[in-house]
Image: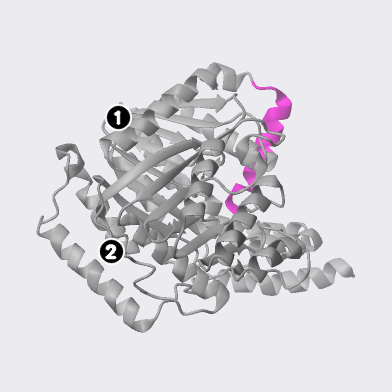
Amino acid sequence: MEIDIFLIINIFLIVGLVFFERRNPTAALGWVLILLVIPILGFFLYLVFGQNFYKKKLSKIKAEDDLELHTIIAEQKAELADRRIHLPDKRLESYRGMISMLLENNMAYLSQNNLVTVFDDGNALYSDLLAAIGKARHHIHMEYYIIRNDELGRKVVSALAAKAREGVEVRLLCDGLGTKLPKKVLQELRSAGGKTAFFFPSLIPVINLRMNYRNHRKIAVIDGTTGVIGGFNIGDEYLGKGPLGYWRDAALKVEGWAVYSMQMRFLMDWNYASGDTLGFSPGYFPEFAGSGSVAMQVVSSGPDARWNQIKAGYLKLINSAKESVYIQSPYFIPDESVLDALRIAALSGVDVRIMIPVKPDHPFVYWSGYSFIGDLLDSGVKAYTYDNGFIHAKTVVVDGIVASVGSANWDVRSFRLNFEANAFVYDTQCAGRLKDLFERDLAGCTEITQERYKARPIRVKFKESISRLFSPLL
């Protein structure tokens, strides 16, 4: 009787899936099978993982600011079309199409006066970030998917509270699922005058059934002149103190006009989560001359957008490669378009290399990704497991001249279900540094050769097969 009731409910859900939601066909078919074959469990899985946000636009800024932003973007489109924008290296000329694409589909403004520092270690990054927080004079804006209730998490919140007591505007945006800070920890910040908000908070205390559509971005903006973007969250494991050991990640500290793009991304996310209407206040967008020369676009994506902008950027990078494509990602569950792009690049003589962890923090996702790695080996793609701890970096470097660093993994969740932010960098020095780090990491890796993959145990093959079945839904 219970099964019959759930079957009836599930049939209504299936009708909604097929006729009212423009889902990926593979994912839609997967949910149809789950709802029919395992109706009771399928119903609860759908409640947690299957809810469709369906393109509800989240970006909120004041109307006059929105008009100003569109005017700025329109002007740069014209400058790019008329070739009034000059790129510092002739090898970057072939990326004008990519710059135009990201400008068109994401309003990702190209700035060329940025000073960029690459961080691959959490100890160095958070020492630098805490120092920047201590020097803040006007405002501190931070949004992170995870802020742990541990030594580092409490240290960062206390540092923010100290600045709030000095009169600095402090805003901390957390994801409602990823961050579980106790009220007393946040109260320290609020009592000092700081403000907090949660993205998609749970309607039920402790439990959050909204597994999809999380704010996975990691952005910090200090005084509108310094920004941090990348893959690091805030917690002791990002310092290598967790069960996975040493934590290899990637982030960029930016000083230059690209910080304005990070600021705009934060303001739109904050306005949605808090109900505020913050906009182009001069205090948030101060005059900045800039002493750097790095060209950069900050690109954001999410289920509220028509296109998968970061995924499009990844594909464009792969298709533009002439010599090499180096990818690092903790989660690798590509769709057919990404698989085809990687195969075509490798078969065309491009040196394609992918680095994933040897230690899974999410086994189901890990074994699914391992199976996709196996599919690429016969095309000449080289793959490696990072054995020196856990690799959480989300980076791609092409030909040592263009790169992307941010929060987006190479998986379905980042491409379709979560809100992400990446920096696309057009600079030989910065991209070269990231390429050097990749090659350094190879010394602590084991290559996944075709022979090794074919010789994997039956239990591994079983894990891969089961996990892969659910990959369109992950």
x and y, in percent, of residue 245 in the image? 66, 30
Residue that numbered label 2 is attached to? 287
Judged from the image, the secondary structure of the residue bearing numbered disc 2 is loop
- Can residue 137 be seen at all in this image of the molecule? yes
Q: Amino acid at mark 2?
A: Glu
Query: Image quadrant of residue 268?
Result: bottom left
In percent of the image, x 68 and y 52: which residue is there? 154
* Residue 460 in magenta stretch: yes
Q: What secondary structure is marked by label 1?
A: loop
Residue 261 located left or right of residue 330: left
Q: Residue at x 26, y 54 (%)?
A: 111
The colour scheme used to paint the residues is one colour
Q: Which residue is mark 1?
A: 348
Query: In this orientation, which residue lies closer to the viewer: 370 or 422?
Result: 422
Check the image and report above or below for 70 versus 367.
below
Q: Residue furthest front?
A: 166
Choose top left, top right, bottom left or bottom right for residue 237. top right
What numbered label is drawn on residue 224?
none
Magenta segment, which residues? 456-473
Tell me, yes or no, whether the highlighted magenta stretch contains residue 351. no
